[in-house]
Image (cartoon, rainbow, N blue to C red):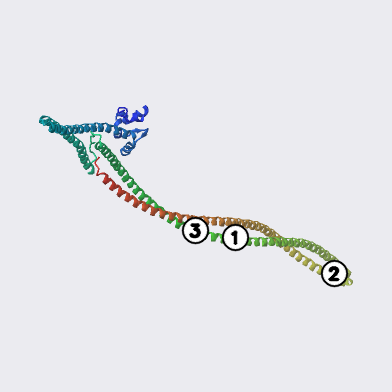
Amino acid sequence: MANHLINCWEHLKCPEDRKNQCPAFIEKRGSECWKVSKTLCKGQLQGTMAQKIGNCRKCDFYATFHKMKCSIKVKIMSGFACMIFLFLVMNLFALYHMKQLAALSHQDLSGVQTFFISAMVFVAVIAGAVAWFATGAVTNPIRQMEQVAGRVAGGDLTVEEIQVKSCDEIGLLATAFNQMVVSLKDIAGQLRHKSEQVASAAQQLSSSSQQITASTNEAASTMSELASTVERVTENTQVVAFASEQASQYAEGGSEGIYRVTSQMKSIGSSTDLVGRSIHNLSERSNEISQIVELITQIADQTNLLALNAAIEAARAGDQGKGFAVVAEEVRKLAERSASAAKEIKTLIVTIQEEAGVGVETMTASTQEVEAGNLVVNEVGESFNSIITTVQQLSHQIQDVAAATEQMSSGIQNVAAASQEQTATMEEVSASAEALTRMAADLEELSERFKL
């Protein structure tokens, strides 16, 4: 039974593949597996030595194995003590009966009594020796533990393991003390390692918090400048919106003016057409008058010719033709005046016709200019309509920009507030990092008290 429980892997019935991976099996320390690091207990990798020892003390194999070892030696020691006790009792009982027999028989039993006394002294010496060895077995481990405990209390964890030679309570205490030293050594090592990690992490955290604080301050400053810029953009947007409204009003007024100009240009065109037609009619009437004047001129010429002929005939008639000659002369003069007036009228008619022609050309040119003006005015009206449409679209876009700018301003204010909160938080984190750095330094100083 003892050989079967001597190794932990036999008690736990570990498979071969698991045993070949366990350091305790490789080092053949199945009865001291709690001293081996990184063992595979029930297929699970053990953690630190402190955790491993804690798990080992809960293991049924550990308790059974130590109980078994201690029970065998305890039984042997108990049996030996019982034998000595029985031997002493038997000697005392024999000595007592010998005294009674001597008193009854009046015989000298001094030799036998001396023998028994010598035996009792021998047994007492043996018992004393056993007690001395037993006392040494108790006091020596305690003295060793006291010395080791003093060194451990001073921070020296480089102490050697106390050699346990007994399996009684003192042996169990020494084993537990060795386990405690191993656990303290493991904890101190981890404490030193973790303190270094904490110190490094605290320094990184402090540096990062300072960088984040600086970045946050820069971001806050940038957001403040951006907020000022957005405010100026908002003001400029309002100015542009007001200007666009005025431009829209002016454009609408211009459109109305163009409409009136268009109407007036149409009226001018109609009037110009009417004047042109009147001048054209006047030119035609002048032509007719010219023809009439031409006819009058021809009649005057013929009349003058007839008067001349009549004067000639009157001259031939003598005194009888004098009255007729006077009439003929008057007719001739009248014909000449008629011819002269007809020439003047013709000259005036020609002048009127020339001026009418110039007027017709001028009116034609004016009509063309009016038509061109109408085209230009129509184009300007269309341009004003386009301007009005564009200004209205621009006004809507400016309103959208103003709304977006207001939202941006609100968002920037929220971001600025969040940046301020983040700055305050990072200041707290920085203070915590500094406190953590101080604690890490204290922890490292504390861990340096242990000599590993």
Q: How far, Cα to Cα, is label 3 from label 2?
A: 105 Å
| 11, above or below 221, in the image | above
Q: Which residue is mark 1?
A: 251
Q: Amino acid at mark 3?
A: Thr
Q: Amino acid at mark 2?
A: Ala
Q: Amino acid at mark 1?
A: Ala
Q: Quadrant of residue 134?
A: top left
Visible residue check, residue 240: yes
- Crowding near pointer 3: few (<14 within 10 Å), some, many (20+)? some
Visible residue check, residue 217: no
Q: Which mark is residue 328?
A: 2
Q: Which mark is residue 234?
A: 3
Looking at the picture, how far across and down is residue 446, in whole percent?
26, 46
Looking at the picture, how far across and down is residue 240, in whole percent?
52, 59
Looking at the picture, how far across and down is residue 409, in whole percent?
48, 56
At mark 2, the secondary structure is: helix
Q: Is residue 340 left or right of residue 216?
A: right
| 34, above or below 363, in the image | above
